Image (cartoon, rainbow, N blue to C red):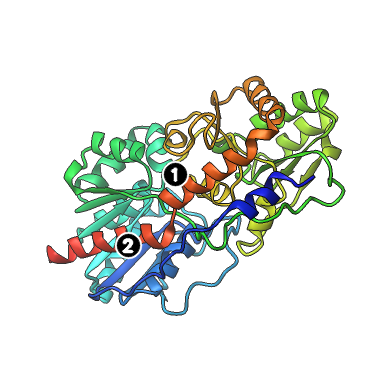
Amino acid sequence: MESTHDLLSKSFSMESTHPQGKCKFSMKIIYFSLDYTPHDQRFLTALAASQHEVYYVRLQRGSRQTEDRPIPPEIQQVQWAGGRKPFEWRALPRLAWDFRRVVAEIKPDLIHAGPIQTCAFIAALSGFHPLLTMSWGFDLMKDIERGRWWRFATRYALNRSDYFTSDAFVTRDRAIAFGMQAERTSVFPWGVDLTQFSPEPRQQPVGQEQGFCLFCNRSWEANYGVDVLARAFVRLARLRPDVSLLLLGGGSQGPAIRQILESGGVLERVSFAGQVSQKDLPRYYRMADLYISPSHVDGSSVSLMEALACGLPCLVSDIPANLEWVREGDNGWLFPDGDAEALTAKIMAAIDQRGALLTIGLNARRTAEEKANWPHNVEKLMAVYETLREKL
């Protein structure tokens, strides 16, 4: 019998995507970001394909490398006081002073900076305009709750920003609540490459050719709730011997997550694939029957968009940003955030309605085509650049 993946790949006729066009104007831009992640690689690749002269300023070098693709050669990486080790607040005066030097030397037409309380805050301290502040989701959904200093940095950066962009309406609303003028905001999902992430015949995990495969590639950090999934899987495994779990990535919660699975006696039914390259990532989505994101905090999740684009039914926590993407029973399902028992029940319900997975997968792909087309969505960023250019 053909799997849902096989049927979906046959019935799917992908909407054509137009190549990203060159901009009709040229600006000197500083792109200032926390680290170098797949998201940064996506933005820098788009900027490299434009006519803009782009300088990349990296605030820190984190303890975990999440992107193995090189920085596009058209991008000029700035050597400065930051970018060599994890960011520390005690280094703020030195970093702010040196960032002013960078701005004075480059003389940019625009600074594009985020997250808000670190990169955008340092950019705002420089006094430069125009400043485009970009939320990364977690900065407005969690970091502003970390204390008075974080709320001060948020207001300071937003009140000195000329424009704001984010990938979800929930973060835009938060920015407005912290002083950003609504008419100087833009929302666009960061999107994915719909040709790379597309429905294909299912590729069964080795040794798990039969049964139902759950997939999660969220980081093993507190924000993303992978421990909730681990507890749910322990419950599920007692009821369904045909279900397996495929996990990617890693993080500081790794020992705790493995302990949950080991003490529950289900470790042998979990595949740990570690960190995989962006090139190989679509293959893992195609191994699964159901994508799960138990995140407590998110903007528009790129991994969720990738799963939708692969035609994979999605089961996600009912946080506000996920509600902008997943419609209950249409392209996936929702469960109460943090509730492992409810998550178990929703997985069981999905398994019991396998006949509906083809239609749900088609609807998932359609959602990605309508909302997550990166070459189309990045044009909105270029339009913001042009708006700011006209104010120069």
Residue 167 rendering spot, x and y as whole percentages: 38, 47
Label 1: which secondary element: loop
Q: Nearer the viewer, residue 197 or 34?
A: 197
Q: Is residue 249 above or below residue 38?
A: above
Residue 204 rendering spot, x and y as whole percentages: 78, 51
Q: Residue at x 41, y 75 (%)?
A: 75
Amino acid type of the residue tagged 2 in the rendering: Glu
Mark 1 Cα within 10 Å, few/some/many (few <14, many 20+)?
many
Give the foreground label among 1 and 2.
2
Q: Which residue is mark 1?
A: 300
Q: Residue at x 66, y 62 (%)?
A: 280
17 left or right, relative to 261: left
Q: Nearer the viewer, residue 365 or 299?
A: 365
Label 2: which secondary element: helix
Determine which quarter of the picture holds residue 233.
Answer: top right
Q: Is residue 79 above or below residue 142?
A: below
Q: Nearer the viewer, residue 280 or 79?
A: 280
Q: Is residue 31 above or below residue 121?
A: below
Amino acid type of the residue tagged 1 in the rendering: Ser
Q: Quadrant of the C terminus?
A: bottom left
Q: Earlier in the sequence, mark 1 or mark 2?
A: 1
Q: Which residue is mark 2?
A: 379
Q: Quadrant of the N terminus?
A: top right
22 left or right, relative to 366: left
Q: Farthest bottom residue?
A: 73
Q: Residue at x 72, y 52 (%)?
A: 202
